[in-house]
């Protein structure tokens, strides 16, 4: 009888080990492709604006699909569409798509409309407090769609698209990504102006609800005014759509390149000319903590070494719906370079250095330059 109990216990243990093995497997974070969510505004029962008889929903879908097609050709970029056909999607769902796919970037594409037909040009928005009534009006128009949704009061925490004050509170959630969102927005605007000579309506901030639930750098592009005769015809043409798409595509590529370059910031190849003995041993930047960001994930993983390929002392910080995982903490830039090398050697190939000054995230480039 005793042996039967032993066997039963042993079986339980084996089962437990197998279960634990799979849990750890699924928790191991690995390097992924750079994911871009392309969000064609409106769709289905929501046509968007109908300036000059055009359909915003159709034009923005064509531009969105073209941006996606161009980006897909880049093998290290993955595209996720919030819609790739004429369907109605609630605003909060668009953010959820981005969240679930753990995207690195969110680009929402729209066309504008205005009472005066002479108004024209392209502008790119990041989430923020509208600086003037006109920006509020644009956001209000794009947010109004939630009134078509069934549970908008619950889904948007009592947000009122008609109230300028309602936008406060939205903005905090994107604060972390503001710098990066602005970088992408400027790149897009620069291309619109330099390549296509579009009238520059600049990079602006306003309270777009669709950008609220995206915990990643996010922009909303107003490609132009359908209410303007020439611009409407241009945006409705294949040529116009392809050109606008190409500008957005190029901007995303440049943005990614900048990110990649930041990762290798100030790092000389192994065989750098300075011999080992002359190299300063430390490079302390006072008041600054450098850390190696090895991963960002919606999963909350225990910071034990076995979950991080043997790296010890991992710090987990929650930012919105994401958890960031940092390795190391030091004011010595040379030391953090070494830690980053270690992390990369362990397989965190996209690990990069971040800097905090008095607890606030700052640019690594700047803190090094100011020294
Ligand atoms: Zn729109």
Image (cartoon, rainbow, N blue to C red):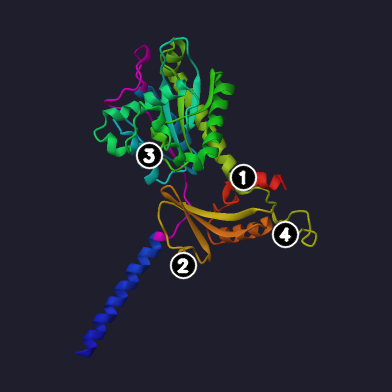
Disc 1 on helix, strand or loop? loop
* Mark nearer the N terminus (3 vs 1): 3
For the residue pair 297 and 34, the one nearer the viewer reads as: 297
**Mark 3 surroundings: few (<14), some (14-19) or many (≥20) residues within 10 A:** many
Residue 366: name its quadrant.
top right
Q: Answer yes or no: do the residues labelled 3 and 4 have beta carbons within 8 Å?
A: no
Does residue 251 show up magenta in the picture?
no
What residue sits 41% from the left and 51% below the top? 298
Label the magenta part by its dominant secondary structure. loop
What residue sits 58% from the left and 45% below the top? 260
* Mark nearer the N terminus (1 vs 2): 2
Q: Which residue is mark 2?
A: 306
Q: Which residue is mark 3?
A: 95
* Mark nearer the N terminus (3 vs 4): 3
Q: Indicate the quadrant containing the N terminus: top left, top right, bottom left or bottom right.
A: bottom left
Residue mark closest to the camera, 2 vs 4: 4
Is residue 150 found left or right of 249 in the rendered image? left
Q: Answer yes or no: do the residues labelled 1 and 2 have beta carbons within 8 Å?
A: no
**Mark 1 surroundings: few (<14), some (14-19) or many (≥20) residues within 10 A:** some
Disc 4 on helix, strand or loop? loop
What residue sits 31% from the left and 75% below the top? 14
Q: CA distance from mark 1 to mark 4?
A: 20 Å
Q: Is residue 360 above or below residue 145?
A: below
Give the magenta-colored segment's residue range. Answer: 27-56
Q: Position of residue 341 (x, y in %)?
A: 61, 59
Q: CA distance from mark 3 to mark 1?
A: 27 Å
Which mark is on residue 71?
none
* Mark nearer the N terminus (2 vs 3): 3
Is residue 327 found left or right of 221 in the rendered image? right
Q: Which residue is mark 1?
A: 363
Q: Which residue is mark 4?
A: 282
């Amino acid at each position: 009888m005793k042996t039967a109990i032993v066997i039963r216990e042993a079986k339980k243990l084996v089962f437990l080990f197998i279960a634990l093995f799979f849990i750890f497997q699924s928790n191991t974070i690995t390097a992924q492709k750079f994911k871009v969510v392309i969000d064609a505004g409106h769709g289905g029962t929501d046509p968007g604006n109908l300036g000059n008889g055009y359909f915003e929903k159709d034009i923005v879908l064509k531009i969105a699909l073209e941006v996606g097609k161009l980006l897909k050709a880049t093998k290290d970029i993955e595209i996720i569409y919030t819609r790739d056909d004429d369907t109605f999607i609630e605003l909060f769902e668009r953010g959820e798509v981005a969240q679930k796919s753990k995207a690195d970037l969110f680009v929402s594409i729209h066309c504008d409309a205005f009472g005066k037909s002479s108004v024209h040009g392209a502008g790119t928005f990041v989430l923020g407090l509208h600086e003037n009534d006109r920006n509020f009006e644009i956001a209000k128009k794009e947010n109004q769609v939630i009134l078509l949704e069934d549970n908008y009061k619950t889904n948007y925490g009592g947000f009122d698209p008609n109230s300028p004050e309602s936008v406060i509170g939205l903005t905090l959630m994107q604060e972390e990504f503001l710098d990066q969102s602005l970088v992408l927005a400027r790149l897009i605007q620069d291309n619109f102006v330099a390549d296509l000579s579009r009238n520059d309506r600049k990079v602006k901030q306003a309270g777009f609800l669709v950008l609220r639930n995206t915990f990643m750098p996010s922009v909303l592009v107003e490609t132009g005014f359908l209410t303007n005769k020439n611009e409407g015809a241009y945006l409705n043409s294949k040529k116009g759509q392809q050109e606008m798409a190409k500008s957005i595509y190029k901007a995303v590529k440049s943005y990614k390149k900048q990110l990649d370059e930041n990762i290798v910031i100030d790092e000389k190849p192994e065989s750098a000319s300075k011999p080992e003995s002359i190299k300063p041993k430390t490079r302390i930047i006072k008041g600054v903590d450098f850390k190696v960001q090895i991963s960002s994930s919606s999963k909350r993983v225990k910071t034990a070494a076995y979950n991080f390929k043997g790296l010890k002392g991992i710090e987990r910080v929650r930012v919105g719906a994401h958890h960031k995982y940092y390795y190391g903490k030091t004011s010595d830039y040379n030391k953090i370079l070494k830690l980053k090398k270690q992390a990369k050697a362990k397989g965190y190939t996209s690990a990069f250095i971040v800097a905090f000054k008095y607890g606030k995230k700052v640019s690594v480039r700047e803190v090094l330059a100011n020294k």
